[in-house]
Amino acid sequence: MIDIRNSGGILIKDRKLLVVRQKDKDFFIAPGGKLIGSETPVEALVRELNEEICIDVQPNDLSDFGGFTAPATGAEDKLLQMNVYLVNRWQGEITINEKDRVCEFRWIDSSDLGKIQLGSIFEHEVLPRLKNMNLID
């Protein structure tokens, strides 16, 4: 049974992937977050990208990358289902919204594996696939 339903965004710039860290966590995850109420995964991601990193994204700026299920990093007793989307375009400068829970962001590539802790879906599924697709270094 799925405990947490999330949407995650893949933002790539200069062949690097954007990851964020929340104030109470030691690991980095995709920008995005939990679906609220009857939100679709796309609606949740558009809202979360604006809330967390202050960018505007339109639904047609997103491409489906896949759905993934894994134990939630930091809460391994819960099963996380994440719909992941490539964010092809965005408006605004990526900055941290100090009112939100995100406190840090980084641009990473495959050479950062093992140097920083990533959420399991991005570490084991998304980052390797991006590297194999030649979208990141």
Image: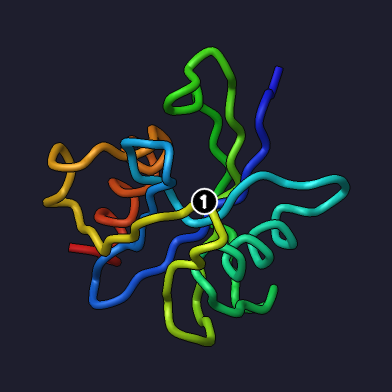
> Would you identify the image quadrant in which residue 59 lies?
bottom right
Quadrant of the rendering where the C terminus is positioned = bottom left
Q: Is residue 16 above or below residue 37?
A: below
x then y, percent, for residue 102: 46, 54
Q: Residue at x 68, y 65 (%)?
A: 47
In the picture as drawn, the residue positioned furthest to the bottom comes out as 91
Q: Is residue 120 above or below residue 108?
A: above
Quadrant of the rendering where the N terminus is positioned = top right
x then y, percent, for residue 51: 61, 65
- Would residue 4 be found to the left or right of residue 124 on screen? right
Which residue occupies the foreground of this view, 137 or 75? Answer: 75
Colour scheme of the picture: rainbow
Q: Residue at x 39, y 55 (%)?
A: 103
Q: Is residue 128 above or below residue 104?
A: above
> Would you identify the image quadrant in which residue 61 lies?
bottom right
Label 1 Cα neighbours within 10 Å, binned few <14 / some 14-19 / many ≥20: some
- Would residue 63 be found to the left or right of residue 103 on screen? right
- Total residue callouts: 1
Which residue occupies the foreground of this view, 105 or 63? Answer: 105
Which residue occupies the foreground of this view, 68 or 134? Answer: 68
Residue labelled with disc 1: 101
Q: Residue at x 78, y 54 (%)?
A: 40
- Would residue 127 be found to the left or right of residue 55 on screen? left
Q: Secondary structure at mark 1?
A: loop
> Would you identify the image quadrant in which residue 57 lies?
bottom right
In the picture as drawn, the residue positioned furthest to the front comes out as 99
| Amino acid on which disc 1 is placed | Arg
x then y, percent, for residue 97: 51, 67
x then y, percent, for residue 112: 15, 49
Q: Residue at x 26, y 54 (%)?
A: 132
In the picture as drawn, the residue positioned furthest to the top comes out as 77
